[in-house]
Image (cartoon, rainbow, N blue to C red):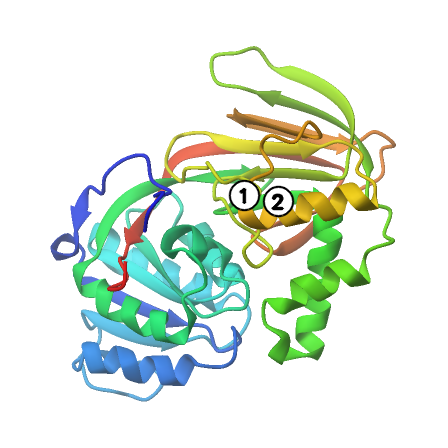
């Protein structure tokens, strides 16, 4: 993919990580987990399928595991890391929530993870492979695991959680919450739920008075009071089904990218969303961007903040964000069409 999200070359080849677990999220996307399992078996005929009792002797070099409920992605990744350490890699086939789970489970371990997009937004995968690959692209990525390369990436520590892609608060979190509700009701909407959610939240109280402090590299901390419609801190570039708030962000540069906007009216929000989609908003005088090592933020009125990381919604009085360099190892896969 052009415009790589990596600042450094990969350090390992697939020969150094021969122990592979494919973790397929049953609840992600449009329910392609069983179809994808067959594609994996076509590439790895001796793989052990833990649900079907497929070939292989436990513990097998290659395993296929379908999730059975909440936190199962994390359990499967943790188990593989404990078994195989630096020889292991977990490929998660799911959405951004599943990617977040596996990254949190493997942070600080020697086990790597890779991503096969099979969710709705697939925003972290878009950082790696460009626009949404679709099911055909996911099949290509399964084949590409045989030629994977590996290197460390950063994570954002957000209070007690890790974020692999993007943290945001304010209006876009309200849009996300509405989009998730629409997806639960109308699964066929897919990533179009985000566009529908924008229309549903058009009269939401969009701006928030924030007190925040951030630390730029080799600079003293800077404190601000600002009324913001949008506030985003990212390790990755994309969120919301392909919007590009942080188009220059790198996954492995030891820094987070910060974007905050002024108080935008309805017309200003419309203009921002249009340029967000293209990643061309950097020149707007109402948008402010920088690179930081850490950020802390709270509401000026002391009320709890509604925020999200990787599409998972939280609420707290204060948010502390810190970039953690080289926190987890990532498999770098290449699509044949690239």
SS category of the residue bearing label 1: loop
Q: Position of residue 2 (x, y in %)?
A: 33, 47
Does residue 158 show up?
Answer: no
- Residue 121 in which image quadrant: bottom right
Q: Is residue 113 left or right of residue 84?
A: right
Establish if 84 lies above or below 167.
below
Marks 2 and 1 in Cβ contact (< 8 Å):
yes
- Residue 135 in which image quadrant: bottom left
Q: Is residue 266 left or right of residue 276?
A: right
Which residue is painted at 27% across and 63% down in the image?
Answer: 337
Q: Is residue 246 left or right of residue 1?
A: right
Q: Position of residue 207 (x, y in %)?
A: 82, 39
Q: Position of residue 64 (x, y in %)?
A: 31, 76
Query: 308 or 79: nearer the eye?
Result: 308
> Circle 1 is placed at which residue position?
279
> Circle 2 is placed at which residue position?
275
Establish if 11 lies above or below 40.
above
């Amino acid at each position: 993919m052009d415009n790589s999200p990596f600042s450094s070359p990969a350090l390992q080849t697939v020969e150094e990580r021969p122990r592979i677990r494919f973790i397929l999220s049953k609840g992600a996307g449009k329910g392609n987990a069983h179809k994808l399992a067959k594609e994996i078996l076509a590439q790895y005929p001796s793989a052990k399928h833990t649900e079907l009792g497929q070939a292989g002797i436990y513990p097998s070099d290659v395993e296929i595991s379908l999730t059975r409920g909440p936190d199962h992605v994390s359990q499967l990744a943790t188990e593989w890391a404990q078994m195989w350490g630096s020889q292991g890699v977990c490929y998660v086939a799911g959405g951004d929530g599943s990617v977040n789970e596996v990254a949190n489970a493997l942070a600080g371990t020697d086990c790597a993870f890779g991503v096969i997009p099979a969710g709705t937004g697939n925003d972290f995968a878009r950082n790696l492979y460009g626009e949404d690959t679709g099911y055909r692209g996911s099949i290509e990525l399964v084949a590409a695991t045989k030629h994977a390369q590996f290197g460390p990436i950063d994570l954002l520590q957000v209070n007690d959680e890790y974020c692999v892609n993007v943290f945001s608060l304010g209006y876009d979190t309200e849009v996300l919450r509405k989009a998730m509700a629409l997806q639960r009701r109308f699964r066929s909407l897919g990533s179009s739920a985000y566009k529908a959610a924008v229309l549903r939240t058009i009269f939401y109280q969009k701006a928030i008075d924030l007190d925040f402090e951030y630390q730029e590299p080799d600079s003293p901390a800077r404190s601000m009071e600002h009324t913001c419609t949008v506030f985003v801190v990212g390790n990755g570039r994309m969120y919301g089904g392909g919007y590009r708030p942080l188009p220059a962000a790198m996954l492995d540069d030891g820094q987070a990218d910060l974007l905050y906007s002024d108080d935008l009216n309805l017309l200003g929000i419309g203009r921002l969303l249009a340029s967000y989609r293209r990643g061309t908003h950097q020149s707007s005088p109402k948008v402010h961007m920088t690179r930081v090592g850490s950020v802390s933020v709270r509401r000026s009125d002391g009320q709890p903040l509604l925020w999200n990381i990787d599409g998972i919604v939280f609420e707290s009085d204060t948010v502390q964000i810190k970039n953690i360099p080289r926190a987890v190892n990532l498999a770098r896969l290449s699509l044949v069409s690239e």
